[in-house]
Image (tube, rainbow, N blue to C red):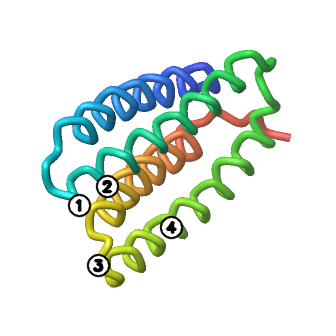
Amino acid sequence: MATSQGLMRTLATWSAASVVGGAVVWAAGRDPQVRAFGRQTLAWGAVDAAIAGFGATRPDPDPRRLRTILHLNCVADVGYLGLAVAAWRRGRTGDGAAIAVQGAFLLALDSHYAYHLEVPAR
């Protein structure tokens, strides 16, 4: 069963990997686009960590409300993928690739939990 705690744990794990991985790539990268990928990944990881941390302090939301939020997040995630394409087209391939990775992961995460969330019948 998908739960809000599972969602927050998964997001926290992803954020930690993004922060650490992004910091390493940013620091060690020699190419500006590689460094941009690392910087962008680190920034997304920090935002994801803040969201996971905030979510972990809150009581479990109503499953219907959580599903609605997850559906709205899926729309935002598709928007992130559009931003990735725009960055890539402007020659910011490092930023675009990092945004695409984050947007794709978040779309998979949000759609998975929206689909598997058990919502009681009315």
Would you say the residues marked 2 and 1 are in contact, meaning their CB atoms lie under 8 Å apart?
Answer: yes
Q: Secondary structure at mark 3?
A: loop
Mark closer to the observer (4, 1): 1
Give me the C-alpha separation between circle 2 and circle 1: 5 Å
At label 4, the amino acid type is Val
Q: At x 46% / y 26%, what residue is drawn?
A: 10
The spot of residue 27 in percent (x, y) is 25, 36
At label 1, the amino acid type is Gln
Tell me, for residue 75, which label it has, or none. none
Tell me, for residue 91, which label it has, or none. 3
At label 2, the amino acid type is Ala
At label 3, the amino acid type is Gly
Mark closer to the observer (4, 3): 3
Give me the C-alpha separation between circle 3 and circle 1: 9 Å
**Badge 3 local density, few (<14 within 10 Å), some, or many (20+)?**
few
Q: At x 29% / y 79%, what residue is drawn?
A: 91
Residue of label 4: 78
